[in-house]
Image (cartoon, rainbow, N blue to C red):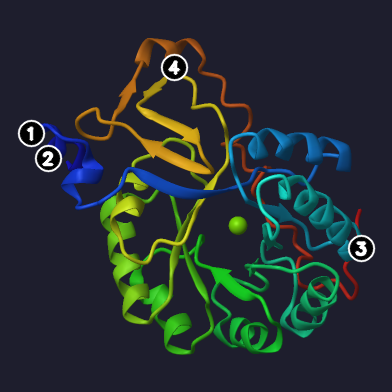
Amino acid sequence: LWDLKAKIAQEPLWRTLGAADRFVPGYASGLDYALTDDELVAFHERWARRGFTGAKVKGGLDVDRDVRRLAAVRDVFRVNSDRPALMYDVNESWGRHQAVRLARQVEERVELTWIEEPVRRWDVAGHRAVATGIRAAVATGENLTGLEHFRPLLAADAVGVVQTGAVWGITHFLRVSTLALGHGVPVSPVGYNANPVAHAAAAVPNHLVTEVQDLSFPVGLRVDQEIADGGIVLGDAPGLGIEVDEERIVARAASGGWSLPSGPHVRPADAGLRLAPQAR
Ligand SMILES: [Mg+2]
């Protein structure tokens, strides 16, 4: 409906939503945990060539490995910035009893912009403990849905960067952003790859940065955007500027396993219950 509304107005949605500028600042990211250190560096060199000045690294099971990789990624982005932004995502893999201790160990060795999902998504007291126990901001929210899920975290001053799934739609993003704005906190969509939320991100006053996960667009979509200058450059096509090539998608129906119950997004049964974080 947002797409239709902007098309009827014969303007790109970012203009319909009131954005003053077509540019959405981004940071580089990917499902990078299985990459070797060399592959991780090569992966981020591609982002650096597109002008990005910060990146996120996933970890949590081996703090020494994480520090090494965070430092390597930081050094890649020094071609664009003297102080690259480093985000560290542990995907709820720590328990409250260890999150402050481990996060402190990491930030003693590399400067972090934020730590993401240090504890389980609904653990308000745990997020608050991390937020007050370390120097970096705590980012969370990608696994929350309704505003009633965000409200306890904001009320407890337990989150420094409110995150939203990029796939939950424009209306949801606008609502979460407004709630965060009312608490003086910035908002940051996760998991972006050519979906409508970029138009809304361009329009809200407290958008911080968007997680961009791929330099190419999904198969079967024609997208009037560019990944350049360290972010997303929205185009002038009316509406979302996204066209679906259904024949091409049907021809490539294999899912690659994303819809299987076994993964890749299944939380290990012992996450948060390991006495010591360790690689397996
Ligand atoms: Mg995350």
Residue found 80% across the figure and 80% down from its top: 98
**Label 1 is placed on what type of residue?**
Ile
Q: Position of residue 77 (x, y in %)?
A: 71, 48
Does the beta carbon at disc 4 come under 8 Å from ligand 1? no
Q: Residues within 10 Å of mark 1 (few under 14, many from 20)?
A: few
* The N terminus, quarter of image: top left
Mark 2 or mark 4, earlier in chain: 2
Residue bearing mark 3: 64
**Residue in the image at 83% along x and 76% along y:** 108
Give, as a three-letter code, the residue at label 3.
Answer: Asp
Nearer the observer: mark 1 or 4; the answer is 1
Q: CA distance from mark 2 to mark 1?
A: 5 Å
Return the disc, 2 or 3, that comes first in the chain's sequence: 2
Label 2 secondary element: helix
Q: Which residue is label 2 attached to?
A: 5
Picture coordinates of residue 58, whole percent (x, y): 73, 54
Query: Do the numbered discs 2 and 1 sit on residues whose CB atoms are within 8 Å?
Result: yes
Q: Nearer the viewer, residue 245 or 185?
A: 185
Cβ of mark 1 under 8 A from ligand 1: no
Q: Give the spatial CA distance, label 4 vs label 3.
A: 42 Å
Residue 142 is situated, as x and y percent measured from the top left of the image, at 51, 60
Q: Is residue 217 above or below residue 15?
A: above
